[in-house]
Amino acid sequence: MATKPTILIVDDDPVQLNTVVSLLQKSYNCVPTTNGQMALKYLEAHTADIMLLDYNMPVMTGIEVLKQMQETEHAASIPVIFLTGVDDTEGEVSALRQGAVDYIVKPIRPAVLLTRVKNQLELAEHRRDLEYAIAERTEDLWRANERLKKREDATLHLLARITDMRDEDTGGHILRTTGYTEIIVKYLRADPNPPAGYEMSEEEAQSIIKCAQLHDLGKIAIPDSILLKPAKLTVEEFEVIKKHPIYGEHFFADFIKSDSEDPFLETAREITYSHHEKWNGTGYPLGIAGQAIPLSGRIVAVADVYDALVSERPYKKPFSHEKAAEIITSDSGKHFDPHLVEIFIAHQDEFIEVSKITDTSPKNEFAFSR
């Protein structure tokens, strides 16, 4: 047997209170109270499906009771119908503006009271069903979005790993470069008054951090004979290597054509294309300078070069952090964005910690032949 809806009735006139209870008690569970304080006390430990509230009462008016109910989470959602002995348009408007769902003028007409109570209970039930459906749908959408995020992260990592597998001598480079990028981005975001051109939303920050791992994606297109050469490259070979930002840009440009509204793809394109540009315009592939270079590319440039300096390569021993820091500092305003170098200098300890990261993934035992 279904539980009867509970109606909390508040009226300081015992005759009116008994009249209302007698009309409703057959179909509903009635809780009669004679003042606002009693009603609020009841609501501290209980709830109700609807409230019938006298408008004019001593000590605490109906409007005052409603205001206090709206300050309590569980009571704020209870539909309130005002009962009043005064046919007062101003009072009715005031009650409805305060959040009442209806306004009934005494003397009570049984059919009117029963119909309006029934209608409001049905509306409240429909509203709860709708809220439940929305909450359930929101949960489904949240879970679907989380799955998409995980797939996106897995896809990014897969692309990064493919790049990393092409060169066995740079294990951990992608992980560390991403870590250095995160440090710079974190302190750019923490600046309450960033210089013009360095403002960054949280969404932009996360895109830069995630896309940093793809900065060398274009190296997939570089022949093994050059990419895996265990010695310093010739001038001609280096010219081939310098094409990898172009290859990476072409890769993302194709995706952007099919989804021009995705800023994430644009960030990935910017980083792959511009992380070898230099502040003074002597970089490649475009030779652009200063803030014409995308901020994302300027950030990854610092991260990429620092890791190259402190890492061992077949043709060089790793530099100490101190030597790497000296090189980056001396290239401030030449190779690197001076503001980003300031961040690097201020947070060198964090760079040192990230530099200790090594890639524990098993390396491939083959090279992709071309």
Image (tube, grey):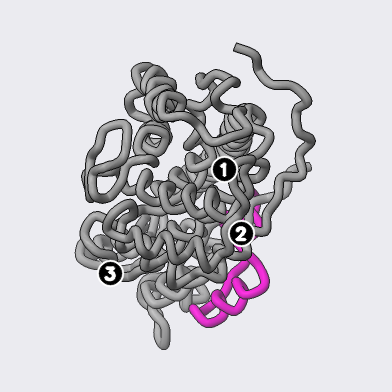
Residue type, label 1: Ala
Residue placed most toward the observer, 150 or 210: 210
What is the distance, in whole Å, between disc 3 and disc 1 at their CAs? Answer: 38 Å
* Quadrant including the C terminus: top right
- The residue that disc 2 covers is 354
Identify the magenta region: 22-49
What is the distance, in whole Å, between disc 2 and disc 3 at their CAs? Answer: 27 Å
Residue placed most toward the observer, 9 or 122: 122
Residue placed most toward the observer, 75 or 218: 218
Residue placed most toward the observer, 170 or 24: 170
Figure disc tally = 3
- Residue at the farthest top position: 370
Indicate the position of residue 237 as horizontal and vertical percent values. 46, 25
Identified at 52% across, 82% down, the residue is 37
Identified at 24% across, 64% down, the residue is 195
Which of the two discs, 2 and 3, labels the residue nearer the N terminus?
Answer: 3
- The residue that disc 1 covers is 135
Q: Is residue 369 above or below residue 308?
A: above
Identified at 30% across, 46% down, the residue is 278
Q: Is residue 333 above or below residue 123?
A: below
* Residue 145 placement, left or right of 299: right
Nearer to us: label 2 or label 3 = 2
Residue type, label 3: Asn
Badge 2 element? helix
- The residue that disc 3 covers is 193
